[in-house]
Image (cartoon, grey):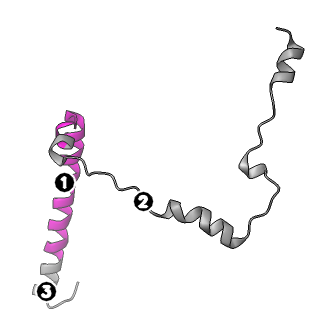
Amino acid sequence: MYADDKAEAIEPVVHESQNSRRMSAREYATTRLSTLKPPVNKAPNPIKLLMMLSGKQWLFFFCGFIAWVCGSHACSHISSTRMLSGGHA
């Protein structure tokens, strides 16, 4: 097979974005309405998902959880201190 044969066999591909025909707003909306409804997939079993976590991922989770608990404790402590002191900082 020669280079000339390959050139004749390959046809240019025209993508949808290169199409020169203009669409009306109604035509555009009707083609896009089907994409607005999300697919309904069955929810996976959460126990199986938790079993898939690695040790490192569990450590990241617990590190974030401990930081969240410490932050909420500090916030509630500051709020209760302000209430006891009469609302002044």
Tell me the amino acid under the disc marked 2: Pro
Which-is-in-front pick, marks 1 and 3?
A: 1
The C terminus: image quadrant:
bottom left
Whether residue 73 is in magenta: the answer is yes
Whether residue 75 is in magenta: the answer is yes
Give above or below for 22 relative to 57: below
**Which segment is the magenta one?**
50-78
Q: Are marks 1 and 3 in contact (CB under 8 Å)?
A: no
Q: Secondary structure at mark 3?
A: helix
Tell me the amino acid under the disc marked 3: Met
Nearer to us in this view, 50 or 66: 50
Residue sitting at x 17%, y 75%: 78
Q: Which residue bears the numbered disc 1?
A: 65
Res 21 label: none
Residue 76: name its quadrant.
bottom left
Res 83 label: 3
Residue sitting at x 81%, y 31%: 11
Tell me the amino acid under the disc marked 1: Phe
